[in-house]
């Protein structure tokens, strides 16, 4: 018995003393050189190794001592989605795009298409056909939308109710419950559902709308306001008016800005009250919205002030007498009294008055002349730049195509240098172009590129409808071809080339095949430029063909 007892040590001898977990963590954080570990090393063992052994033993002990927790209730069944599933080829394509989204341009030649830039187009096309995403790809789709905010609206539309159901089970996808509302398109009429309910009530129910407005997250409330106003502007305004006095200033500003898309004369009374808001930014936004309503009382007050500053003389010149002061009435109507650095006070006040004046008043005051005739009139005493710049802002704010057209003029006129010598409209023509019909916009930009090249065309191309109209696409490709033949650096045009990959009509791929050959390098050209140009055009052609294949895969069989 004695021998047996000596062979098996007692329980107290077999169980080492375990140091408190907090002491082990403190020693690990500070380092064994600064704090002696609360453990005794074995013979030949250094202090760091002893500390790690003790931490491992303590971890096992802590885990073994955990008591089983009650099982969580099983989640509700995923809701149904009656939309048709993707065709097999489109399903495979989506899996490929989601797998390649995080490594654009890697793992292949420089001429390979950028899958990350094709995913937004694929989602838009799929939603146009009313498909639903396969259940197996929902996690990858939500991961993609979490990483890129520009994908969220289209991704959540494709994911449908099952995407929201799945997002409730994973905190990393909570953006779908909060941000789905904020990512809705301006024209969306869908009312958001509350994020804390697995079985939401009818979103059209007034009680549900009121509860979400009072209890929802901020992004949900912004979306709710936009959706309600899109269906019933008066109901949306009543919703906002009910809590306006208790909202924070930054929230009032966002709510006010959301009125912009469905702005109507019935909003005038509310906006007039907002002119007295304690927040300067809220007052300024309210004044801007009122000035976008040509029949508003504020627009009439601004017009009266402008009429006293700008007049037509008997010899056909425009005379300008800028305001001498900014009184309290002007400030209440949104005129910012203090100009930015380097800007004169009087010209600053004048510009704000003119941009808030209804544009049709100028024809009334200037003898029935049209916008083009008024813009062509000489302006006395060097006020032309200030006056035309204010008219440009007014044309954009009031979405006036005739005035935008007159201020833009012909695209072959002065260069868009952006300097003081250039007309005001040419310093930022993209904004004026956005007020023109899509076809006219594309034609104007095509003529601009043919006359001035691509150096100043990037912002103009960004406001053109996709896919680009044939004249615009031809002008861009011709300009790229000219730049290549001139020996220009290809990387200087990488931005335009990237736009072309996403915006050119895919049907142009065969016509561009001739540009993919490596040209002979001429004397004076950038070394290796020919090869880079060839790879860029190969990538362009490959991307166009891939876009064509994507469209064909998503088109339902006839």
Image (spheres, rainbow, N blue to C red):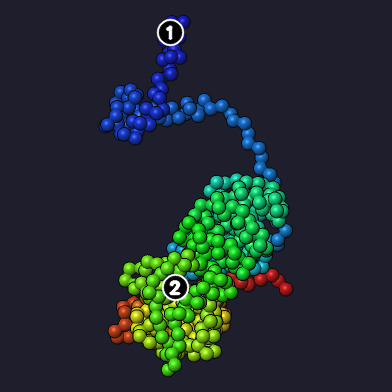
Left or right of residue 76: residue 453: left
Give the residue furthest to the top.
1
Residue 7 position by quadrant: top left
- Residues tagged 2 and 1 counted as in contact (Cβ below 8 A): no
Residue 257 image offset from top left, x and y in percent: 53, 63
Q: Name the residue: 50% across, 81% down.
A: 404
Can you say whether 492 is above or below 474 in the image? above
- Give the foreground label among 2 and 1: 2
Q: Position of residue 49 (x, y in %)?
A: 34, 31
What is the count of numbered marks?
2
First-in-chain label (2 vs 1):
1
Q: Which mark is residue 3?
A: 1
Q: Residue at x 59, y 64 (%)?
A: 269
- Residue 323: give x, y in percent of width and height: 40, 75
Whether residue 309 is visible to the viewer of this picture, yes or no, is: yes
Q: Position of residue 146 (x, y in %)?
A: 52, 55
Q: Is residue 524 left or right of residue 78?
A: left
169 versus 48 height, above or below: below
Query: Which of the two residues, 419 or 475, is positioned nearer the viewer here?
Result: 419
Circle on res. 220: none
**SS assignment at label 1:** helix
Circle 2 packing at 10 Å, graded few (<14), some (14-19), many (20+), is many
Q: Secondary structure at mark 2?
A: helix
Check disc 2 and report the residue beneath it: 352
Q: CA distance from mark 2 to mark 1?
A: 103 Å
Q: Is residue 154 left or right of residue 421?
A: right
Give residue 548's quadrant in the image.
Answer: bottom right
């Amino acid at each position: 018995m004695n021998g047996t007892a000596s062979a098996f040590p007692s329980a107290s001898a077999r169980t080492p003393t375990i140091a408190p977990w907090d002491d082990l963590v403190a020693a690990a954080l500070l380092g064994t050189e600064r704090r002696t570990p609360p453990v005794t090393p074995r013979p030949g063992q250094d202090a760091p190794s002893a500390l790690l052994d003790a931490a491992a033993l303590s971890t096992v002990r802590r885990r073994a001592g955990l008591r089983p927790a009650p099982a969580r209730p099983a989640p509700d069944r995923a809701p149904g989605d009656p939309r048709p599933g993707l065709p097999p080829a489109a399903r495979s394509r989506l899996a490929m795009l989601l797998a390649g989204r995080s490594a654009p341009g890697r793992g292949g030649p420089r001429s390979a298409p950028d899958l990350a830039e094709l995913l937004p187009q694929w989602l838009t096309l799929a939603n146009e056909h009313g498909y639903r995403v396969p259940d197996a790809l929902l996690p990858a789709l939500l991961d993609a939308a979490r990483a890129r905010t520009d994908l969220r609206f289209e991704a959540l539309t494709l994911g449908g109710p099952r995407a929201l159901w799945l997002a409730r089970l994973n905190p990393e996808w909570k953006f779908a419950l909060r941000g789905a509302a904020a990512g809705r398109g301006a024209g969306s009429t869908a009312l958001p559902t509350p994020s804390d309910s697995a079985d939401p009530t009818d979103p059209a129910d007034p009680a549900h709308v009121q509860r979400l407005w009072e209890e929802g997250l901020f992004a949900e409330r912004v979306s709710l306001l936009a959706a309600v106003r899109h269906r019933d502007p008066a109901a949306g305004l009543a919703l906002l008016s009910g809590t306006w006095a208790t909202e924070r200033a930054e929230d009032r500003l966002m709510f006010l800005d959301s009125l912009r898309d469905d702005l109507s004369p019935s909003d005038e009374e509310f906006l007039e009250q907002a002119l007295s808001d304690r927040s300067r930014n809220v007052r300024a936004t309210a004044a801007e919205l009122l000035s976008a309503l040509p029949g508003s009382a504020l627009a009439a007050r601004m017009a009266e002030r402008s009429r006293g500053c700008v007049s037509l003389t008997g010899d056909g010149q425009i005379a300008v007498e800028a305001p001498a002061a900014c009184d309290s009435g002007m400030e209440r109507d949104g005129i910012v009294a203090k100009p930015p650095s380097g800007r004169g006070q009087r010209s600053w006040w004048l510009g704000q008055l003119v941009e808030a004046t209804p544009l049709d008043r100028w024809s009334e005051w200037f003898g029935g002349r049209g916008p083009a005739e008024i813009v062509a009139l000489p302006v006395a005493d060097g006020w032309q730049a200030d006056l035309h710049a204010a008219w440009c802002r007014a044309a954009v704010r009031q979405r006036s195509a005739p005035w935008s057209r007159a201020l833009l003029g012909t695209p072959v006129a002065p260069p868009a240098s952006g300097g003081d010598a250039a007309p005001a409209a040419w310093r930022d023509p993209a904004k004026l172009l956005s007020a023109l019909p899509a076809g006219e916009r594309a034609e104007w930009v095509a003529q601009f590129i043919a006359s001035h090249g691509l150096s100043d065309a990037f912002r103009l191309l960004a406001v053109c409808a996709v896919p680009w109209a044939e004249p615009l696409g031809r002008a861009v490709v011709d300009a790229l071809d000219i730049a290549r033949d001139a020996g220009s650096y290809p990387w200087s045009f990488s931005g335009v080339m990237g736009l072309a990959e996403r915006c050119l009509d895919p049907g142009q791929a065969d016509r561009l095949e001739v540009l993919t050959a490596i040209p002979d390098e001429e004397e004076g050209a950038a070394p290796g430029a020919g090869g880079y140009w060839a790879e860029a055009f190969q990538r362009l052609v490959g991307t166009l063909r891939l876009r064509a294949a994507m469209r064909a895969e998503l088109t339902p069989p006839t």
